Image: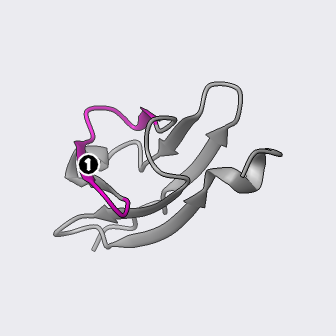
């Protein structure tokens, strides 16, 4: 049985970029899905660190990180919470 590191996500305000750090060995097992009121965007991890520009998406983004073998994770990014613009 393998032990997988949980993903960590960081939001950079100046570039409106979401960075997700996945398990350095098992990263290829993950699919990242960003979901907003108007769109779903899927990313297949090709490295342990995935940088996704999110400035063009809605302020509230649901983040699903899925894998058949390594677990599933969920989070929410509210971009407006990081600025004075609502």
What is the x, y in percent for residue 57? 43, 44
Q: Is residue 60 left or right of residue 36?
A: right
Q: Quadrant of the N terminus?
A: bottom left
**Magenta span includes 44:** yes
What is the x, y in percent for residue 21? 49, 44
Secondary structure found at label 1: strand
Image quarter for residue 83?
top right
Going 28% across and 67% down the picture, which residue do you hit? 70
Q: Which residues are magenta?
A: 36-53
Residue 4 vertical position relative to residue 19 in the rendered view, above or below = below
Q: Is residue 38 left or right of residue 16?
A: left
Residue 22 vertical position relative to residue 55 in the rendered view, above or below = below
- Residue under pointer 1: 41
Going 33% across and 72% down the picture, which residue do you hit? 72
Residue 9 vertical position relative to residue 50 in the rendered view, above or below = below
Going 41% across and 50% down the picture, which residue do you hit? 23
* Outermost residue toward the left in this view: 68
């Amino acid at each position: 049985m393998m032990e997988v590191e949980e993903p960590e996500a960081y939001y950079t305000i100046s570039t409106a970029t979401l960075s997700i750090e996945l398990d350095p060995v098992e990263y290829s097992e993950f699919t990242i899905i960003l979901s907003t009121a108007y769109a779903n965007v899927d990313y297949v991890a090709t490295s342990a660190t995935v940088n996704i520009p999110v400035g063009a998406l809605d302020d509230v983004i649901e983040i699903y990180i899925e894998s058949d073998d390594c677990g599933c994770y969920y989070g929410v990014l509210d971009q407006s919470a990081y600025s004075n613009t609502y």
